[in-house]
Image (cartoon, rainbow, N blue to C red):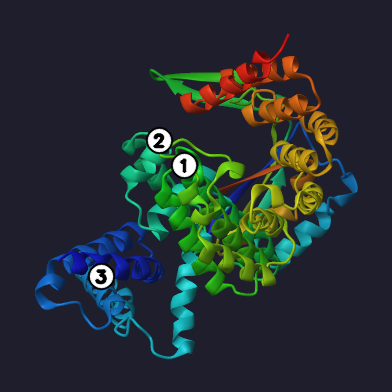
Amino acid sequence: MKYLMFVCTDAAPDTDPTAAPDIEEWVAERDGKGQRVLGSVLGPASAATTVRVRDGELLLTDGPFAETKEVIVGFDLLECADLDEAIEVARAHPMAYSGRLELRPLVDLA
Amino acid sequence: MGDVAGAVAEAGAEAYPRIVATLIRVTGDWTLAEDCAQEALATALERWPRDGVPANPGGWLMTAARNRAVDVLRRASVERRKLRELARLTDPEPASPEAEGDVVDDRLRLIFTCCHPALALEARVALTLRTVAGVPTADIARAFLVTESTMTRRITRAKTKIATAGIPYQVPTGPALVERLPGVLAVLYLLFTRGYDADGEPAFAAEAIRLARLLDRLMPDQPEVAALLALFLLHESRRAARRDADGNLLALDVQDRSRWDHAAIAEGRSLLDRAGDGQYALQARIALCHATAPTAADTDWPAIAGRYDQLVRLRPTPVILLNRAVAHGFAYGPTAGLRLLAEARAGGALDRYPPALTAEAEFTARTGNPVRAAALFRAAAALVQSAAERRALLKRADDLTAGGP
């Protein structure tokens, strides 16, 4: 299955910053195992543009669609057998310690 | 006729989780698996009175459920591979112990999947009751004080998440098992307390015991499983003695101990031989101290206080801190109890918890301060739900002040 992993900040990070693993190692290991299809750091929330069409009219808003303290700062597309494997991949990511990760399965429309 | 219905219920209780678990593994369809298991039970109720109870009731039910699944899937023109796999389930009651292993794994798979931490806790409990224990959704809804349609949605949402999020149908191994087992036990614990609480559904306690027994049989090398089963049995042993003729709850010290279930106590005690010293084992050993005291006055309070000291190190929750204070009060006097009680109440979590006020009232009375004690009993009375409990607390308050100046 494919999972899109949203990498978010969190207002309450782990109190032991030394526990977080290294991001370069995480990327190298997951790429090596074929668990990470692609991924990237995102530009800041201030660079976001929200797009809607309402009554046929294009509406653009400056900023992300949800006004929260936590912002999505990156993403990874994972390829895992099941949720348990995806959880193992996510827990090894440094942002699991200083932020939070959201795993969303991709829907296979085929 | 009644005997046949009893035979169906008995065979069903044993066979139901096995059938559902196996059909889910083979078909991947939770609803189909449950429907087919239910229909097999209905068919048995219809046929067994006429044809007699089969020699192997569980095997008969499995075959009936499997045939039903084959029918449904054939009509839905499901892929051949699945049908072939289903058709291979011809020997539903495997003779050899090695073959038994596969079937056992299915039930464990089902329990661990229902209790997956990616599901909300309330959904885990509901799904376990519905799928593993086969409890009707209406009964689950009543126990959780929601409408049947709300409960149906909750269970459906959980099943949908299992499918769409890719929650695997498997028992975790190695370090993952150590991590996940406590979550499974927490679901059983919640199920049991739902059945043991004053206004609980007694059948849930029985289900929790049945599931704990199954888990203990399937994972005999896990001490906390044996400990949890022991804890359940030791509490359940008091059920018959817990209420007076009017149905009011009785405190431990006024229960008729001859009405305790001594077979359950003996089983709980022997389970503790292989129960380790985790949180459930400590709670079970505390329950055993109560269960084996010939009279309330014989209770070994210093031993209980020691167990609570150990338990607090593992789980310093407000309620455990409170119980520890009470145990110390009985073991070492009301002043010791009040000191630890103040510690337990420091966070404020117990401010509106009647047992905390009652304990403080009790110890305050013993230190020779009846006026303050009576006020505390009245404060506790204002917070309790049950009218009978409120009356009892107000009477305590009145008794304390009646003899006063």
Secondary element at image label 2: loop
In this picture, residue B145 sits left or right of residue B235:
left
For the residues beneath circles 2 and 1, the answer to whether they share a chain is yes
Task: Looking at the picture, tell me which residue is in the foreground, B311 or A44.
Answer: B311
Residue B244 drawn above or below residue B178 = above
In this picture, residue B53 sits left or right of residue B140:
left
Cα separation between marks 3 and 2: 34 Å
Q: Which mark is residue B243?
A: 1
Residue B160 drawn above or below residue B29 = above
Cβ–Cβ below 8 Å for labels 3 and 1? no
Residue depicted at x 71% and y 51%: B299
Q: Which mark is residue B84?
A: none
Packing grade of label 2 (10 A; few <14, some 14-19, many >=20) is few
Residue under pointer 2: B246
Task: Looking at the picture, tell me which residue is in the foreground, B227 or B12.
Answer: B227
Residue depicted at x 70% and y 52%: B298
Residue depicted at x 81% and y 28%: B342
**Quarter location, residue B48:** bottom left
